[in-house]
Amino acid sequence: MSRINNNINSLIAQRITGQQNAALGKSLERLSTGLRINRGSDDPAGLIASEVLRGEKAAITAAIGNAERAEQFVATAEGGLQEISALLTEVQSLVGQSANEAGLSTEEKEANQLQIDNILSTIDRIASTTSFQGTKLLNGNFDFQVSGVGGSVDNLQVNDAKIGSDNVAVTALVTASAQNAGLFLSLGATSLDLASSVSSFVFELGGAEGTRQFSFGSGATLADMATQINTFKDVTGVSAVASGNYIELKSTDFGSSEFVSFNVTNRGGQAGGVVTMCGLDADLIGPTATNFTAVTAAVRDEGQNIAGTINGIAARGNGKTLSVASDAISAEVKLTTAGAQATGSVTVGTLTGGGAEFNLGAEVNLNNQVRLGIGSVAARELGQFNDGTLDYYLDDLGSSGDLNVVDGDLNKAQSVIDGALREISTQRGRLGAFQKNVVGSTINSLSVAFENISAAESAIRDTDFAEATAELARNQVLVAAANQVLSIANSQGQQALTLL
């Protein structure tokens, strides 16, 4: 080389050395940060994909936290209900003890009543104080708000519903009416006319609650027979009404689980027969009868469940209650007797809000939002029981109530407690199902999604240390070689001195 103003070989060596040093620096950066992509220039498309995945991971992490918080919320509410259930069991025991009329003194009954008063007060206290982060859980604060409840609705329980920006109208369509089980005893007269050689007319009457045998003598009126049957209606589940030459026997409740069975044990020469109801109406006398002489086995009639839809969704019928469980709404609608026995459209009400709302998905939208209805469990709200005239609740078991254990009606008190226990148990079951099948499954699903997205993000963005360390060793050798070459190139200018 005979020129010294421009050393082209040195310039080439300098450029190569700079490139090798930059590659070495990038290898060191990737190894020190653990990331293959540290800036957009490293991999523009990979950066975009990995940032999207990072956003999804953050959303899933928040959703898992929401689900865990929801589980803690529900567990707190269920803990309060568990204690109320134990208290109701104690009340049930006290009512059973107090029913032993001859075996208890007035002082003992008053002591039992004092315990019941204390328990009712404790139930109200639990209902008003059970809270999560300062928000009351069991006082009806998270019950669904319903306006315009129709006159044919006896009770409405909304467990879950999707409520967006607009209110949700709830309507029911009754396609088949609810019916009692029913039979008619046709005697052809207003009183029994037995053969002279027979002392009584004996038959066996059965219902959903049990079976009992009745015996009546000659001359007993239909009204006498109906009164005797009604005396044991709590035992049999069958009531009686005397009308003309008939006694109408009906189950005390509605639904396919109700029945009335009649079998003659001793006809005593009495004329007449058993008449089935007409069609689906238990108040209409059918066209045919089975004479007592032909009754060789029990004549039986069964009730019918209501059938229909709620907001167009096929509902399950049980007695006078229609219930539906779908992603849009989960509710139970109990109709009045008149409403349940008439087919056609029924206005239930309009959902305007309420419920405990949780967002259990990575995206904030209606599909990922879940509302859980938790009604009030105060004593004045539990155990609704209608005796045909009045509604009774758990607080009626208090000292000033009609169902107190000192001088109240303990049969009705027992029915109220049974109803209250069913309500609390049902509520606990719903909360447990929410914890297990909604929250638990959501956490599991989100956790799997988080793992998969993390794996995808790692494959795109994280450093492969085996590859990076090999690249580092290569770059180190290349940098050393480039420096050596640059040194040689810089020394070539010295050759010009030999010409001088």
Image (cartoon, rainbow, N blue to C red):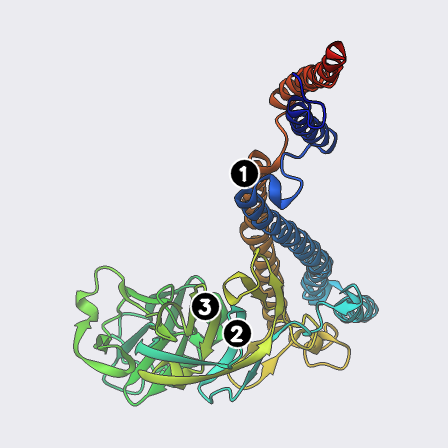
310 to the left or right of 475: left
Q: List the residue tagged with mark 1.
A: 456
Pick whichever of labels 3 and 2 is earlier in the sequence.
2
Query: Disc 1 or disc 2, which is closer to the eye?
Result: 1
> Looking at the figure, which quarter contains the N terminus?
top right
Near mark 3 (Cα within 10 A), the count class, few <14, some 14-19 or many ≥20, is some
Location of residue 254 in the rendering, given as x and y in whole percent from the top left corner: 39, 72
Near mark 2 (Cα within 10 A), the count class, few <14, some 14-19 or many ≥20, is many
Pick whichever of labels 1 and 2 is earlier in the sequence.
2
Q: Please name the amino acid that badge 2 sits on.
A: Ile
Q: Please name the amino acid that badge 3 sits on.
A: Ala
Residue 75, located in which quarter of the rendered image? bottom right
Q: Callout 1: helix, strand or loop?
A: helix
In this view of the protein, can residue 96 be seen by the observer?
yes
Q: List the residue tagged with mark 3.
A: 328
Quote the CA–CA distance across marks 3 and 1: 34 Å
Query: Disc 3 or disc 1, which is closer to the eye?
Result: 1
Q: Please name the amino acid that badge 1 sits on.
A: Ala
Residue 356 versus residue 452 in the image, above or below = below
272 to the left or right of 226: left
Pick whichever of labels 3 and 1 is earlier in the sequence.
3
Location of residue 213 in the rendering, given as x and y in whole percent from the top left corner: 39, 64
Q: Callout 3: helix, strand or loop?
A: loop
Label pair 3/1, CB-CB below 8 angstroms: no
Toward the front, the furthest residue is 500
> Looking at the figure, which quarter contains the C terminus?
top right
**Residue that appears at 76% across and 70% down:** 120
Residue 418, located in which quarter of the rendered image? bottom right
Q: Callout 2: helix, strand or loop?
A: loop
Q: List the residue tagged with mark 2.
A: 163
